[in-house]
Image: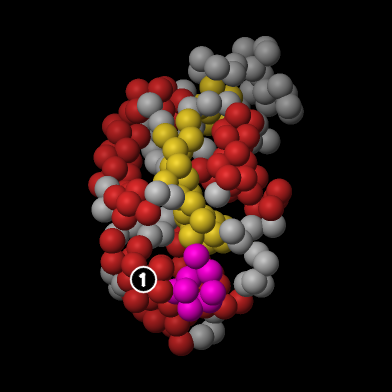
């Protein structure tokens, strides 16, 4: 089964992708990860990617498509793909159709993790972690049992991500809407878009996705 997993930063897309990888043996094809992996490879494509990235330029659709093509060629026929961060344009969506067909595959479903923007801002701006062990906390939803002391390791040092600000979150949301706007109508016309409440508890989101996959 091949799926596209959509959702703005903070919607839990990475968490759910990890669950799918663990439970179904699927492979997450993240454009960011693939670019880093391809760049390190001593191949013609790897050298092309390195040259573009070193020049500070955007990687072309042609190169991204080549990476997807290569990755699918390396995968077993019984391994499903989770497309993360691709496609982002109508041209990429049509290119993906061609690549999948070349490998005897097709998209089963496009799953979008829906979020409430204000609630997402609260979720992201309130999170912090233990600077020592990385245990996660939240200002309103998950404070340490003893104020200022990590439940897991007892450390009293905590940290926040510098980009976990309201302005940054809302900018990311706007960018996400702009990037998904061109491709959602393509898949909605095919009747393969399913929306899941990304603001629900992690386990409930997982169950909802499993239900979607079972009926795809």
Residue 169 location, quadrant: top left
Q: What element carries label 1?
A: helix
Can residue 117 be seen from the camera position used here? Answer: yes
Check residue 188 for magenta coloring. no
Residue 78 location, quadrant: bottom right
Front residue (pair 182, 141) = 182
Q: How many marks?
A: 1
**Relative vertical location of residue 154 with respect to residue 84 in this rendering, above or below:** above
Front residue (pair 185, 5) = 185
- At horizontal 29% and vertical 43% (from top left) the residue drawn is 177
- At horizontal 58% and vertical 45% (from top left) the residue drawn is 215
**Direction top: furthest residue:** 146
Front residue (pair 76, 125) = 76
Q: What stretch is highlighted in magenta?
A: 99-106
- At horizontal 65% and vertical 64% (from top left) the residue drawn is 79
- At horizontal 41% and vertical 59% (from top left) the residue drawn is 86
Can residue 16 be seen from the camera position used here? Answer: no
- Decide: few, some or many residues near mark 1? Use Cα within 10 Å; few <14, some 14-19, many ≥20: some
**Relative vertical location of residue 87 with respect to residue 73 in this rendering, above or below:** above
Check residue 100 for magenta coloring. yes
Q: Where is residue 122 in the image (x, y as percent from the top left)?
A: 42, 22
Left or right: 50 with respect to 132? left
Q: In which quadrant of the rendered image does the N terminus lie?
A: bottom right
Residue underneath mark 1? 95
């Amino acid at each position: 089964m091949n799926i596209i997993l959509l959702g703005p930063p903070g919607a839990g897309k990475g968490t759910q992708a990890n669950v799918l990888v663990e439970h179904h043996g699927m492979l997450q094809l993240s454009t960011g990860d693939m670019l880093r992996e391809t760049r390190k490879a001593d191949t013609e494509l790897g050298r092309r990617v390195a040259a573009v990235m070193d020049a500070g330029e955007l990687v072309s659709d042609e190169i991204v498509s080549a990476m997807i093509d290569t990755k699918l060629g390396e995968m077993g026929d019984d391994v499903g793909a989770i497309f993360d961060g691709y496609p982002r344009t109508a041209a990429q969506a049509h290119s993906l159709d061609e690549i999948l067909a070349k490998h005897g595959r097709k998209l089963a479903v496009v799953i979008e993790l829906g979020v409430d923007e204000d609630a997402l801002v609260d979720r992201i701006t309130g999170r912090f972690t233990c600077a020592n062990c990385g245990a996660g906390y939240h200002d309103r939803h998950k404070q340490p049992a003893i104020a200022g002391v990590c439940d897991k390791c007892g450390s009293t040092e905590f940290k926040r991500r510098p980009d976990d600000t309201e302005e940054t979150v809302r900018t990311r949301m706007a960018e996400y809407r702009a990037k998904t706007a061109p491709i959602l109508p393509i898949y909605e016309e095919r009747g393969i878009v399913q929306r899941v409440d990304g603001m629900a508890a992690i386990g409930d989101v997982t169950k909802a996705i499993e239900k979607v996959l079972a009926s795809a």
